[in-house]
Amino acid sequence: MGKGKKRARSGPPGSTNHPSNRYSDNPPDFAVLASLYPSFKPFVFFSGARPRIDWTDYNATRELTRILLLHDHSLNWWIPDGQLCPTVPNRSNYIHWINDLLSSEIIPSCSGSKVKGFDIGTGANCIYPLLGASLFGWIFVASDVTAVALEWAAKNVQSNPHISDLIEIRDSKPLPDHSSESHVPEVVDRESQKHSSQTIPAEETTTLHSDSLDDVNKSYMGPPILLGVVKENETFDFCMSNPPFFETFGEAGLNPKTSCGGTPEEMVCNGGEQAFVTRIIQDSIILRQRFRWYTSMLGKKANLKLLISKLWEVGVTVVKTTEFVQGQTSRWGLAWSFIPTARKIISPPVAKKSISSFMLEGITRQYSAADVLQSVEEFFKSCGASCKLNSSTFSVDIVASSDQCNIISKNGIRDVETVRSHGYEKQSLDSSSLQVPEDNLSFRILVFQQMPGTLLIKGSLQQKDSPLSGLFSVVFCSLEESMKSKFCR
C-alpha cells in the first residue's frame, strides 16, 4: 500500500467518473473525515503527506462506506462481518448512469411521475436503493434470497425513515407455484434481426435457437431473478444488478490489494456473470416492455461483446454500454430495452469512444513490449490497413477503410495467412503526416509497460468526428481478443 502509483485517483487512460458523481472531482479526504468522525480515525495513516487507509482491512473499508453514506448522503448504514461492502463512489456512478438513461430521449418516459426501479440481489448493504431513493426520490423493489441479506437490507431501510417508504425488500426464493424453470424461454435464431434496431411488437412470440442462449444459461442454477419475483402486472422504469462476477470462490479472492468481503451467494454462481446476465436477458424476453430499461454491471470487459451480440439476436430495440471507473477499479454497464425508440438511432449498436484501453497480464518472459507492438502492427497490416510503427514512442499509427474494419470486426484476424490469401497486401506509411480520406478510420495504438509481465494497450481515435467512429470500439475489442490469445496464459 506504500506505492502511490497503485492508488492513483485518476482512472485508466480515456476513462472518467460520471460527471454528476460528487466524487468525480472531489475524492473523499480521509484526513478531514477522520477529524469529523472519531470512529474512522484509527484506520487512517499517512504515507508522506497523503492520508490513506489499508484497503486490505475489511473494517477500514466498511467504516469508510458507513461515514461516506452518513456524511455525504445523510444515510444510516451498517452490515455484519463478511457481507459484501460496496464502495460508495463506484456505486454512485451506476446510479447516475441509470438517471442518464431515464432522462434520455431514446426511450419514451412512462406516464407516472415516480420512477420505480428493481434492484436484483440487493445484498445486506442495499446500497443502490438507498442511493437512488436519497439522490432522486426513486421507488425501489430490492430482492435477495439469503436470510442475512434480507434481514440487514430491511434494517438499513428502517434506519432511514425519511426514505423507508420508498423501498420494499422482497424475498426472491421461488414460491411453490412459481418455479423459475417453467418460465425459461426457448430461443430462435433471428438472423435478420441480429444487428437491427427495428421494433418488435410486444404481442409477438419471441423464441430463441437452443444454441444461442442456452449454451451459457444452462450452467445457471440459482434462484429466480426477475420471473417469479416480479409480480403480475407490475411495471418498472429499470432494473439493475451487481451480479456474481465469478464462477468459483477461489477466483473471487484473487485480488490481494482489497478486502470488500462478500459471501458465496454474492460473489459466485455457476457460469459467473456471463450466465447470470444471460438469465436476465432470457427473463427480459418474456417481460419485455414491463421494464423501460434492463441493466446490469459487468466485472469483465470481455463479456460485453458476447452479451451485446445475444441482445441483438433477441430483437431488442436499443443497447447502451458505459464504463464505471473509480480509482483503479473499472466496471462496465450494459443496458437494453424492447420499447420502440422515440427517435431514430443513427449510430451503430456500439458505444462511440475516442479512447479505449485494455491490459495484457501474465505475459510469458519470452515476449517483450516490442514483440507486442510488432504484433499489433501485423494484426492491422494483415487486413490491408496502412500502418506506421514508431519504436521510440512504442506506437503504431493506423489508417483503415470501412471494409478493412468490417473484416477485423467479423473475423478477428486470428489467422494472418488466411486473411492474406484473400488478396489483402501489406501497406506502410512512410510520411510523417498521414493523409486520411474521409471514408477511412485513423487511430493510434500505444503500448505501455506497467510492471513485469503486464502491459497496457491504449487506442486513441485521431478523427473524433469520423463517420466510422462507431467501428473503433469493435475493432479495438477484436485487437484485444487477438493479443490476449497470443500473449497471455
Image (tube, rainbow, N blue to C red):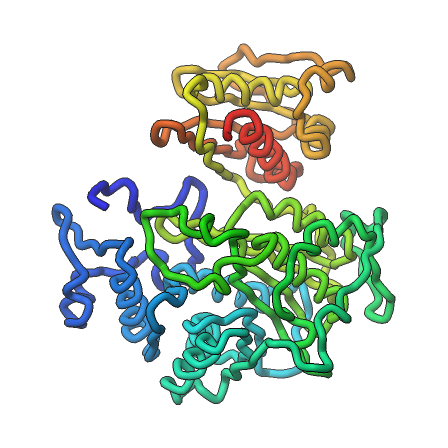
Residue at coordinates 15% horizontally, 48% vertically from top-left? 47
From this viewpoint, which residue is outermost toward the top?
430
Residue 402 shows up from this direction = no
Percent x, y for residue 189? 84, 50
Residue 363 at what x, y percent from top left? 45, 27
Q: Is residue 289 above or below residue 199?
A: below
Provide residue 260's location: percent of width, then percent of height: 36, 59
Corner quadrant of residue 174:
bottom right
Q: Residue at x 46, y 75 (%)?
A: 149
Q: Quadrant of residue 275?
A: bottom right
Residue 347, compared with residue 61, is above or below; it is: above
Q: Position of residue 422 (x, y in %)?
A: 78, 17
Q: In the image, is residue 456 above or below residue 226?
A: above
For residue 257, side relative to residue 427 (left or right): left
Residue nearer the viewer, 10 or 310: 310
The one of 153 and 179 positioned closer to us in this rendering: 179
Whether residue 153 is visible here, answered yes or no, is: yes
> How many numbered marks, from 0 up?
0
Answer with left or right where residue 253 lies relative to residue 467: left
What residue sits 48% from the left and 66% below the top? 95
Q: Please give the name of the residue rendered at 41% of the width and 20% of the height, measured from the top-left corner.
A: 365
